Amino acid sequence: MTRGELIEQIKKKRSFLCIGLDPDLNKIPEHLLKEEDPIFEFNKAIIDATKDLAVAYKPNIAFYECHGARGWESLKKTLDYIPEDIFTIADAKRGDIGNTSRYYAETFFNYLKADSVTVAPYMGSDSVLPFLEFENKWVVLLALTSNEGAKDFQMIESIDGEKLFQRVLKCSQEWGTPENMMFVVGATRMEHIAEVRHIAKDYFFLVPGVGAQGGSLEEVVRYGWNKDCGLLVNSSRGIIYAGKGANFSNQVREAAKKLQQEMAEILREKKFV
C-alpha cells in the first residue's frame, strides 16, 4: 500500500484506527475453542465487525508462532482475509543483518503479503535496509516504545546530550523516507511525542498504548499530528476482548466504533475530511 492510499483510507473511513490482532486462547470466547481453527475464527469475527472502522490491522506474530505450524497457518489465513484496502502490520520486531533480514522480509512481504513489518534498529542499517528494497512495502521502526524498560537504553544520552532514540530517528531517515518508513512511538510517553514529531515531521507514527495501557488519544493527536494526520493509533485488548459471549463481536464493534467516532470528530476539527 502506498502512502497516498493509506491517507485516502483515513479520509474515507474518518479513522486512523489500527486494531491489534493478538489472539490468546485463554481469553477468546469459549465457544470458538470448538472450531477447527479458533484463532482464525476469532480474528475473522473481529475483522467482519470492524473492517469499516479500522484503517489497519496489526497481528502480533508471537501470538501465532507459539502454536507452531498451525499458528503460522492461522496467521496466513488472517492476513489473506483482511481486505486489500486495509493496511496490514506484521508486528514481528525483527532485526538481524544481511541475508537473514532479507529472508525475514521475504517471509512477511512475499509469503504473508503484509504491507509492513516492525523492525528493531539496534544492529543499524544492515538490519533495516533489506526490508526497504520491496516496492510499496513499509518498515515500522521501533523508535520510542511505551514499556517500562524503554528507559534502559532508549533514554541513554551521548556526550553531546543526544538521547539514543533521537539518534535512531535522525539516522534512520537516511535509510528510508515517509513513503516507506514509519516509527513506533509509545502513547504513554506524551512528554516525548512532540519531540519525536519535531525530528520526524513528515513520517507516520504507529502509536500503541491507547486504551488498556492508559494512553490518551487527545494528547497523542495534540503532540503527534502532522499535515497528513501522520498517526495510526493502535488498540488491541481494549477492543478485541470487549466481549466474551457468543455475540462478542457486537461488543467488539461497539468498542471500535467509540474510538473511531472520537477520531472522526478530531479529523473534522482538523478539517482533514
Image (cartoon, rainbow, N blue to C red):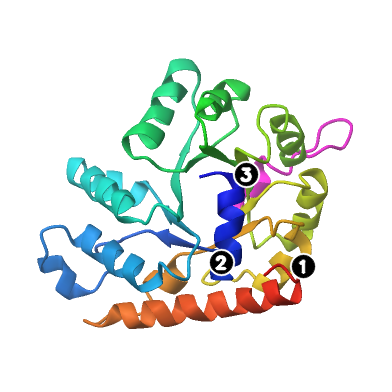
Amino acid type of the residue tagged 3 in the rendering: Met
Give the residue type that dot 2 points to.
Lys
Quick one: label 1 or label 2, which is nearer the N terminus? 2
Above or below, comparing residue 93 to residue 217 in the picture: above
Check disc 1 and give the amino acid type.
Arg
Q: Assign a secondary structure to mark 2.
A: helix
Q: Which residue is mark 3?
A: 182
Assign a secondary structure to mark 3: strand
Residues at discs 3 and 2 in contact (Cβ within 8 Å)? no
Q: Is residue 148 magenta?
A: yes
Left or right: where 74 falls relative to 172: left
Dot 1 or dot 3, earlier in sequence? 3
Residue at 61% in and 56% down: 7
Residue at horizontal 34 percent and vertical 82 percent from the top: 250
Q: Is residue 240 magenta?
A: no
Q: Position of residue 170 (x, y in %)?
A: 77, 34
Numbered mark located on residue 222 in the image: 1
Residue 208 shows up from this direction: no
> Image point 17% across, 69% down: which residue?
32
Q: Nearer the viewer, mark 1 or mark 2?
A: 2
Provide residue 74's location: percent of width, then percent of height.
Answer: 23, 50
* Nearest to N terminus: mark 3 or mark 2: 2
Q: Taking 272 as reference, is 110 above or below it?
A: above
In space, the residues marked 1 and 2 are separated at their CA atoms by 22 Å
**What residue is pinned by disc 2?**
12
135 left or right of 241?
right
Q: Position of residue 71 (x, y in %)?
A: 23, 47
Q: Give residue 191's mark.
A: none
